Image (spheres, rainbow, N blue to C red):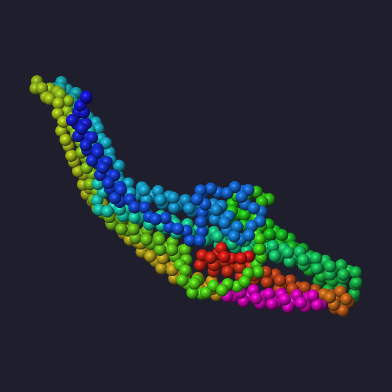
Amino acid sequence: MKQIPPHLQVMKCVSLAVLLLMAGNTRAQVAYPPVVQSTGSSMPASGVIASPTDVPKSVDFTQYLQLVRSNNLGIAAQKAQIDIADAQIALAALFPDPTFITGLAAYEMSKDKLPTIATFGLNFTIEGGKKRQVRTEAAQADKVRAQAEFERQIMAVQLDATNAFIDYLRARELQTYRQSGAVLLQRLLNRAQTVRKKTDAVAEVQLQTEVLRGQAELDAANADVYIFSRAMLGFVQPGAENADRTLESKGSLSLSPLSISDTKVSQVVREDVVVAQRALDVARKREELSRENRAMDLTFNVGVNHARPGEYLGTALPQSNSLMATVAIPIPFSLRQDGDLRAASAATTQALKQYQDINLRSALEAEQARARYRAAVSQMQKYQASVDLTNNALNSHLDLYLNNKSDLGDVVLLYKLVNESQTSSIEARANHARSMATMLNQVRELHTMRF
């Protein structure tokens, strides 16, 4: 059996020792964090975006939220940040790559015939302090922050999509009302032209003006229905490039007021506060890493010099193998590490101030949301009372007018009042729905809305 040369045996032992050292350090220091479960939202496990045929022509609110969570490209893009952060954890735990060195240390070109010396060596670096451990922990903290940002993105997109859903319902209710109003106005105009009275001349002009105004408002309502149906489709992406493709929402704006308590709203930690807290955790870990980076890294070189047989000044020189070992110790002349530490410390201070600011503002904004919702409920109720009052008066005078017991001017005036009250009531109900969505989104119960 062929024997392995002595210098190769030495190199084999050195290589095995270094590889075992690297494997042991990697297993000891890599610790992957547990997966943080999503709160009230989910993404498909496959990450596949649905095809246009998967989006129906009309959806209720529950179906719509499901489509938004599974199809929205903004949410999918944000989710990729978690995968990137996960990969960074593995990178942070890696041991510095060793370097294999080989070459000729001496090659005799003169007539003295000195022996040729070949060098085989291995360079490897041992990091000082707890650099790899803290670097891995910083990467893990960054993944937790990416997960919090993903949750915030889901909640923000869902709220925006809900507002588009509400805008469509508002536009559709205005469209329905404008259509019925146009029928009533045309009926009144036909009646006025059939039974003309001198006293109704001015009222007839007013009526014709209302007819034209109603037609213009109906055109605007038709446009709004198309615009907001396209806006809804934009949140689920597939088919949005086709201008003829629309998405309609089922339901109405007649929502019962919330019974949610102020205490529950104030106790829930908002997602932007969670993100700020996670960003502060990352900044603190990076500052700790900057401190650990001040520890020196030692670079070792272990190798063999192999000299072939030769001759020098008539004296024969035998083959020889010599072991060499060196260590390189860096001398930190520059202030780069001090500068990195100061920058990391300043970043931690900045993240702390941002967290404190968002935390204080979140409490104030929660109080404002509650006050805004209470005002929206009161406004909705008062406008509905106005609609009931003016509708009763209009119906009464309309019967009298058709029986020649009331003037056209009174009917036209009452129609204007009804038109203003009905329009304001629809806007108030839409505003109430938006305020309700904001409140429920804060407590992660947006999916409980029943349109």
Q: Left or right? Give the position of 384 relative to 183.
A: left
Q: What secondary structure prevails in the magenta region?
A: helix
- 132 above or below 389? above
Q: Residue at x 51, y 67 (%)?
A: 443
Number of marks present in the image shown: 0
Tell me the quarter of the picture where residue 318 sits. Answer: top left
- 357 above or below 31? below
Q: Residue at x 22, y 24 (%)?
A: 1
Residue 189: give x, y in percent of width and height. Answer: 85, 68
Q: Residue at x 26, y 42 (%)?
A: 20
Residue 414: give x, y in percent of width and height. Answer: 77, 75
Residue 266: give x, y in percent of width and height. Answer: 48, 72
Q: Nearer the viewer, residue 71 or 92?
A: 71
Let me know if residue 228 appears in the view: no
Tell me the quarter of the picture where residue 19 sits. Answer: top left
Q: Left or right? Give the position of 244 relative to 351.
A: right
Residue 377 painted magenta: yes
Q: Nearer the viewer, residue 450 or 214?
A: 450
Tell me the quarter of the picture where residue 167 sits. Answer: bottom right
The span shown in magenta is 372-397
Q: Left or right? Give the position of 420 relative to 140.
A: right
Residue 16: give x, y in percent of width and height. Answer: 24, 38
Residue 310 painted magenta: no
